[in-house]
């Protein structure tokens, strides 16, 4: 299995922007060049383990959060993404998002069952 460095770079980019840091700020704080940070975020360069740890320390996230999605089987694959999505939501917004997700799940499963039944005919 291959590590998806493009996904890691995209996550670094998103978290950096959410933290209102420029690439220059991140590079400076992590002791890296701006061009290296840019290449990591755009998936054009593989981030070294040393640089990854420095970046996660600056961004205040764990290495696990950035590597999430690279495992073949990960039962909590989108948990961090959902936590980030809901972090700034009010209780009311969280409830609405939950109800929408629950309805979408039901529709997906109902349609799957329907499509299975129609192929059996």
Image: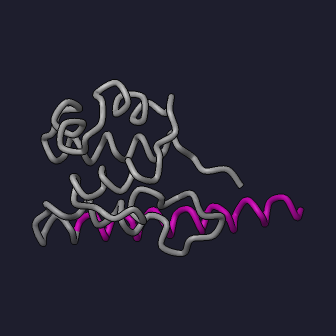
Residue under the image location 28 percent in, 61 percent down: 61
Name the foreground residue: 65 vs 78: 65
Left or right side of 65 for 1: right
Q: Decide if residue 112 is on the left or right side of residue 54.
A: right
Q: Position of residue 9 (x, y in %)?
A: 42, 41
* Residue 46, percent from left and from top: 52, 39
Residue at 16% x, 36% y is 25
Question: Residue furthest toward the bottom?
Answer: 75
User: Which of the image's four quarters has the C terminus?
Assistant: bottom right
Instruction: Name the spot of residue 19 as percent of width and height, x first.
Output: 15, 47
Q: Is residue 81 above or below residue 102?
A: above
Specify the segment rendered in magenta: 96-121
* Residue 111 part of the magenta-drawn span: yes
Describe residue 24's horizontal placement relative to residue 32 as left or right.
left
Q: Is residue 63 left or right of residue 113?
A: left
At horizontal 53% and vertical 58% (from top left) the residue drawn is: 69
Q: Residue at x 34, y 33 (%)?
A: 37
> Colour scheme of this structure image?
one colour
| Residue 81 belongs to the span the image colors magenta | no
Q: Residue 27 placed where, x, y %?
A: 24, 36
Q: Residue furthest top?
A: 35
- Residue nearest the viewer, comparing 106 with 80: 80
Query: Is residue 68 positioned above or below 18 on the image?
Result: below
Nearest to the observer: residue 73 or residue 112:
73
Pick out the residue farthest to the right. 121
Q: Quadrant of the image for the N terminus?
A: bottom right
Instruction: Give the main secondary structure, helix, strand or loop, of the magenta stretch.
Output: helix
């Amino acid at each position: 299995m291959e590590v998806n460095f493009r996904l890691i770079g995209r996550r670094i980019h998103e978290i950096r922007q959410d933290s209102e840091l420029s690439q220059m700020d991140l590079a400076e704080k992590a002791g890296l060049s701006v061009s290296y940070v840019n290449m990591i975020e755009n998936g054009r360069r593989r981030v070294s383990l040393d640089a990854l740890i420095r970046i996660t320390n600056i961004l205040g996230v764990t290495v696990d959060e950035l590597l999430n999605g690279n495992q073949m089987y990960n039962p909590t694959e989108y948990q961090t993404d959902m936590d980030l999505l809901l972090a700034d939501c009010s209780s009311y917004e969280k409830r609405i998002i939950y109800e929408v997700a629950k309805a979408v799940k039901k529709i997906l499963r109902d349609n799957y069952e329907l499509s299975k039944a129609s192929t059996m005919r």
